[in-house]
Image (cartoon, rainbow, N blue to C red):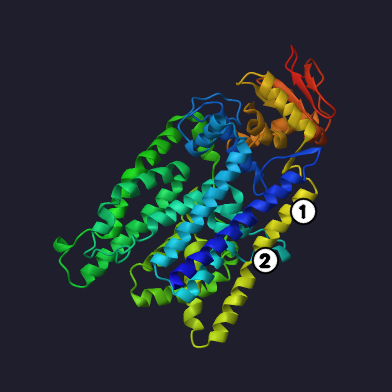
Amino acid sequence: MLENESKRVAGWLGLGLVLVALLPYLLAYRAAGDEFVFSGFLLNPIDGNTYLAKMYQGWQGHWKYSLPYTAVVEEGAYLFLFYLFLGHISRLFSIPLLVTFHASRIIGTVLMVWALDRFVRVLEVGRRDRSFGLALVLFGSGLGWVGLMFGAFTSDLWVAEAYPFLSAYANPHFPIGLALVVWLLTPQTGDKGIGDGGERDEGIGDKGWLLAIMSFILALISPFGVVIVLVILGTAAAWELWDKLGAGKDWKQLQIPDAGKKFIYILVGGMPVLVYYFWVVKTNPAFAEWNRQNLTPSPPIWDFLLSFSPILWFAIPGAVSVYRSGDKSQRILLIWAGLGVVLSYLPLGLQRRFLMGLYFPLAILAVIGAGKLLAQSRKKYILGLTILFLLVIPTNLIILATSIYGIQTRDPLLYLTKNEAQAFDWISENSGPEAIILSAPQTGSFVPAHTGRRVLYGHPFETADAERMEVLVEGYFRGDIREADQKSLQIADYIFVGPRERRLGNCPCANGVQIAYENESVSVFRRGTTFLR
């Protein structure tokens, strides 16, 4: 009865998260009216456009991805297959790309809620704590709202992969990736726990290849998720072996712990994809440049402490309680939380990737810690958890409020004008598939997502030599580009001139070019004999 009630609570919490993750997007779509077109993204729209650009290539029938935010035409590679696959789905079933994107995001949210609920049930987190813990995980955040009062823009406002709520709100690959990570780290039902090398070997044996398949899928969707799982499971297996050696067992008589078995299967499933990705970024010049620029450093320590407070306050006594209890299944929470913090500050270019899903183990440890600290008084326990929940909600409410404000003001990062959208339609229907568009940097973010055409600049990571190209493009539309730099822009086939370009300055676009398309506020010029002054 209690188990069924727990599942019902999880179902209602999941439905609530789906509604919160979906309704602002529906509002944004309806608010576009007759003069605007919603671009489809409310959180980190610059990266959102790159996801749509990847889907566009799938819609065009490609399985190899080539960078559309740079003018250099390189050999494609089997990267970002998840979004290419979604593009193929859109084409096969005649579904708009944005509909497929957001449907996948909602499906991913449901899978994430299911995986998180299954995790806390298998780990046998106390029944009275379970529902609150899941609510905290799904809707909680940090104290970024406090930081805003002092002008700080902290990680809990934008590092979506670390927080389930933001993952559900941002894109499909974050919640699906987190669901797979949690699923792979969850002990098999009926096992003694992760890292337990006891008698129930059958808990892994007949499911091993399923683990390998899930690892392969995770590598395609979120490659770094496989790295996180392998590091956690490897540590869990080493800890178990250390315990047994400490208990006086001969190492020759030790069996491979369940965590070690899972590690092997997951390595077999995910490593070929990771090796291929590594090979691509080392041998393909375009992707090597993308990888060089694709740096994701972790936030400063003060930012981290604020972004994961107040759950950190309770997670520490929770971790002590789990360690002392000797519960081998709950030990995975200690390993995930501890390694997540430590690895995020190693001197690596992608250190922030280790924050993926970190809010989850910390929040569950916080619930366990609160239960231990306030166990003597039911009233204090309820009051303490209520205060904790009230402290972690405001940051996400601010994110929602910011989205509403962006919708009401028709923020140009969120909306295209109707004329811009019509010009994009003309480009996609009347230009060649390899056409290159010269536009303002902000417009360049939208062009590949809505036309499938290349741009000279459009993204800080996916544009080759991004900093220099951004300066050149802005200089061109301001009319102050140096003559020595003009050759870098002459590769463009069309010049897009709309409201974003005119805001930069006095564009010299009418010199020696032909008007190919024009409406009330947008002109598209075709390259002529003298492309620049």
Q: Which residue is at 69% across, 48% downward?
A: 26
Q: Is residue 208 above or below residue 2?
A: above
Report the residue at 18% width, 62% height from top.
254
Q: Mark 2 sits on what residue?
A: 394
Q: Taking the image as drawn, is residue 457 in sight?
A: no
| Disc 2 secondary structure class | helix
Q: Label 1: which residue?
A: 405
Q: Quadrant of residue 300?
A: bottom right
Q: Residues within 10 Å of mark 2 (few under 14, many from 20)?
A: some
Vertical side of 206 occupied by 189: above or below:
below
Q: Quadrant of the N terminus?
A: bottom left
Where residue 325 appears, as percent x and y from the top left, is: 36, 77
Q: Position of residue 525 (x, y in %)?
A: 76, 20
Task: From the viewer's perspective, tell me whether residue 157 is left or right of residue 324.
Answer: right
- Asked whether, in this view, residue 284 is left or right of residue 50, the answer is left
Three-letter amino acid code at the position of disc 2 = Pro
Along the line of sight, the residue nearer the viewer: 98 or 254: 98
Secondary structure type for disc 1? helix
Q: Position of residue 324 (x, y in %)?
A: 36, 77
Using residue 490 as the reference point, say whether residue 367 is left or right of it.
left
Residue furthest out toward the top: 529
Q: Amino acid at mark 1?
A: Tyr
